[in-house]
Structure formats: C-alpha cells, structure tokens
Amino acid sequence: MATDLVAIVHMSGGRWVARCPRPFCTNGECFGRCDDGTTGGLAGDSFRCRPEYGGCGLVCRAQWPDADAVPVIEQLVLARPVPATRNWVPGETPSHLLAENFEHGIVPESVFRDGQVSLVGNEVTRGAIEAGRHIEIGG
C-alpha cells in the first residue's frame, strides 16, 4: 500500500463500510459478506476499491474506531429496529448513540448492568468512573 490515502470506516444501515478516499471515486466497500454474496473490499485494516464493482482499484489502509469502541457501537446501533437508522460516524460517542436510543424509546438492558449507566429523569449518568457526567435527553 504505497499511498497516504486512508479509508475511514463508519456504520451505515448496520454494516461496517468505508468510502473510497480517492478524489472523484464514489465507490464504497463493506466489511464481510455483501448483499450479492461476494466479500467486500473492507477487510481488517485494509481497503480495496474493487474495480469489478465500479471502483477505481485503490488499495489503502482502513481506519476503524478504537477496538474497544467497536462492540459498544454495534450493541447500541444494532438495537435499533429500523435498519436505515443503524448508523454511526466518527466523532459520535457511545453516549451520543445511547441518548439517541433513549430519545426513541430504545433502551438496551445491558447498558444498565453493573452500574455502567443509570437513568434519572431525563439524564443518563455513567458509573463511578465518570460520576457527575450526564447526557440530557430530549431538550
């Protein structure tokens, strides 16, 4: 991979995907199995813009969220019943996703286990590590 370009991974419709970072290429690739049964061009820490699927052929590094964040993001986003709302972009925190879920009545039971977070009125408060920090829900 002799390029400085980096494909930024995000979640769209409940799938990990990345857009080709090459200017003017509009192709995107998914991680794992695609709808047509093929394997997408996003694999581990690499991205391959598959020319056989309209891509430009670029091979570059893929930048994922922190490894610790991936299962948390998946847990919060995949709890949403409508696939079109199962999205995450870099910069969104798990607290932000949790607040969105609460706003729409989606409350994954697992987030309340072991005092990870608590809900008091319209405030989500994290456990003792971040005591006093909260997210206001609604407005």
Image: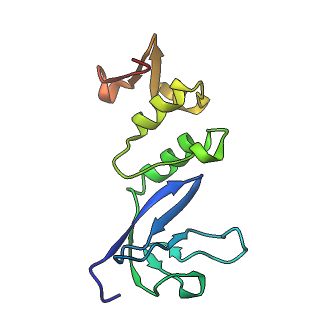
Q: Is residue 112 above or below residue 49?
A: above
- Residue at the far left: name it: 4
- Residue at the far top: name it: 121
Q: Quadrant of residue 34?
A: bottom right
Of 51 and 75, nearer the camera is 51
- Residue at the far right: name it: 37
Q: Is residue 72 above or below residue 130?
A: below
Q: Quadrant of residue 122?
A: top left
Q: Quadrant of residue 105?
A: top right
- Residue at the far front: name it: 24
User: For this view, does 98 lie left or right of residue 1?
Assistant: right
User: For this view, does 38 lie left or right of residue 21?
Assistant: right
Q: Residue at x 34, y 22 (%)?
A: 134
Question: Percent position (x, y) of residue 138?
Answer: 44, 19
Q: How many marks?
A: 0
Q: Residue at x 45, y 29 (%)?
A: 99
Question: Percent position (x, y) of residue 119?
Answer: 47, 17
Question: Percent position (x, y) of residue 74?
Answer: 54, 48
Of 14 and 129, nearer the camera is 14
Question: Percent position (x, y) of residue 6?
Answer: 33, 73
Q: Residue at x 38, y 76 (%)?
A: 24
Could you tell me which quadrant the N terminus lies in?
Answer: bottom left
**Colouring style:** rainbow
Could you tell me which quadrant the C terminus lies in?
Answer: top left
Q: Is residue 55 above or below residue 26?
A: below
